Image (spheres, rainbow, N blue to C red):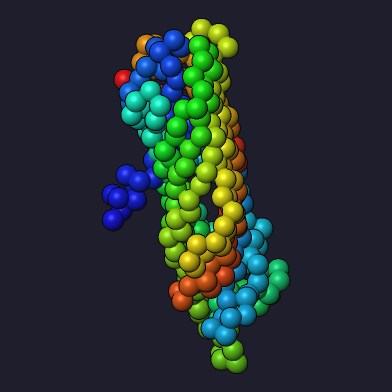
Amino acid sequence: MAFLRIASGLSAAAGLFAAPALAQRFDDTVSIRVEAYFAGVGSSAQAATVSGTLGTSIDFEKDLRLDKSKTLPALEIGWRVNDDWVLQGQYYGLSRRSSATLDHEISFGETVWPVSARLGAGFDSDVYRFTIGNLIHQGPRLELGLGVGLHATDFELFIEGEGQVGNGPVRFHREGRKIFAPLPTIGAFGQWEPASKWTLSGRVDWLSLGIDDYRGRLINSEASVSYKIHRNFDIPTSYRYVNYKLRVSKEDWNGRVRYEFSGPAVFIRAGF
């Protein structure tokens, strides 16, 4: 199952290829991009009680002192199927842990933690993206396309420490939630070669809809500039912004999650 998720999750800008009239890189059938993503992170979550009452909207960075920035390894793969179609994919993951002393009361699920409680917390995510793109314009130095895809995120989070459930005694409680949220997207991409060896590219993906037990909104965007150092290798840099809100109505998690990544990335791209 994990292999299928990874195989179906590889995305983003690595697949922005163009017509043979451009530099040699646009003739590549397959491209692989390995990057370091310097991400600023924002995350918050809520979990309801059994009766359906939503708990505190918890800011995991402000309230629980999770890291606000992290360097993430990421992998992107692109395959040019023919002159009109490209497949693109991406994976990156983030794992954070923290400990914090509360300056206000919070509740998550059935548990209430009071002011001054010492808590441990964690927030993990694995992001998989897959896009099928159709090239609608191919000029001598410009390419534009539209795509549909899947943005799937595996969330796992927890809060633990001395708290109280209902009128029970104060003791150690751990509240954890885990969910896999696959969301379809539509998007547009393009690239332009302003000069020999230089390429500017970008893409945006978007979603706002409800599917089964999920309702959400997703924005994924990226802009990059690359310089060719060899027939098969580029050194690019990029900036990525990802923001989504998700309302979950499932037996194991009735609540909300908000998540945001933004920041630059440096990487090397190989094309064959």
**Which residue is painted at 35% across and 20% down in the image?**
28
Q: Position of residue 3 (x, y in %)?
A: 28, 49
Horizontal side, residue 61 vs residue 18: left or right: right
Question: In the image, is residue 245 above or below residue 8?
Answer: below
Residue name at image x 44 percent, y 64 percent: 179
Q: Residue furthest front?
A: 136
Residue 239, placed above or below residue 120: above
249 lies above or below 197: below
Q: Position of residue 210 (x, y in %)?
A: 54, 61
The quadrant the N terminus occupies is bottom left
Answer with left or right where residue 2 lies relative to residue 247. left
Left or right of 50, for residue 114: right
Residue at the top extreme of this rendering? 196
Q: Nearer the viewer, residue 120 or 145?
A: 145
Residue 163: x, y in percent? 57, 80
Identify the residue shown where x is 46% and y is 27%.
135
Q: Quadrant of the C terminus?
A: top left
Note whether 8 is above or below 29 in the view shown.
Answer: below
Residue 73 shows in the view: no
Q: Quadrant of residue 132?
A: top left
For the view shown, which residue lies furthest in the bottom direction? Answer: 167
- State the image quarter where residue 9 is shown: top left
Q: Depth check: 130 or 178 in front?
A: 130
**Could you tell me which residue is drawn at 56 percent across and 29 percent down?**
202
From the top left corner, tell me how far across and down residue 256 is, in percent: 58, 66
